[in-house]
Image (cartoon, helix red, strand yellow):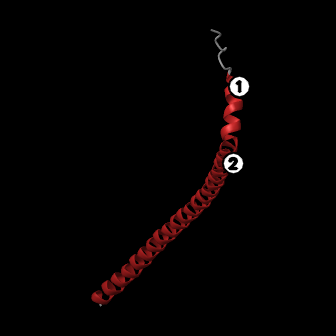
Amino acid sequence: MATKPPTSLSELMTIRDILMGEIIHEYNERFEKVEADLQAQREALSAKEAALDERIKALDALLQQKSTDLATHFKDKMEEDRQSLSALFLSLGQELKR
């Protein structure tokens, strides 16, 4: 009884390609398309993330500037009110001395 030599890997791959080659090729094309779409989505998301980060930084800078402006305005207003009140007390004191 003669035994057949074991089938080599290349022979198995050839048989697989003959039987399922078109299906495998179709799946490979679909997989490559999905990978390309995913990469495009990643790039778009990265660009949106960078744009959002820039907007947040700009808003933060604007908030800091407005906060500084408001603090300066309050400080100036308090000093102005303090001087007005001081002048009023001096005037009142002089009126009481008469």
- Please tell me which residue lies in front, 85 or 49: 49
The residue drawn where x is 58% and y is 64% is 55
Q: Which mark is residue 88?
A: none
The residue drawn where x is 65% and y is 50% is 30
Residue 71 drawn above or below residue 10: below
Q: Where is residue 77 in the image (x, y as percent from the top left)?
A: 44, 77
The quarter of the picture where residue 12 lies is top right
Kind of residue sitting beneath label 2: Glu
Residue 50 drawn above or below residue 26: below
Q: Where is residue 7 in the image (x, y as percent from the top left)?
A: 66, 20
- Extreme residue in the front direction: 1
Specify which label sits upstream in the sequence, 2 or 1. Answer: 1
CB atoms of marks 2 and 1 within 8 Å: no
The residue drawn where x is 71% and y is 37% is 18
Instruction: Report crowding for label 1: few under 14, some 14 to 19, many 20 or more residues within 10 A (C-alpha).
Output: few
Cα separation between marks 2 and 1:
24 Å
Instruction: Assign a secondary structure to mark 2.
Output: helix
Kind of residue sitting beneath label 1: Glu
Quarter of the figure that contains the N terminus:
top right
Instruction: Assign a secondary structure to mark 1.
Output: helix
Q: Mark 1 points at which residue?
A: 11
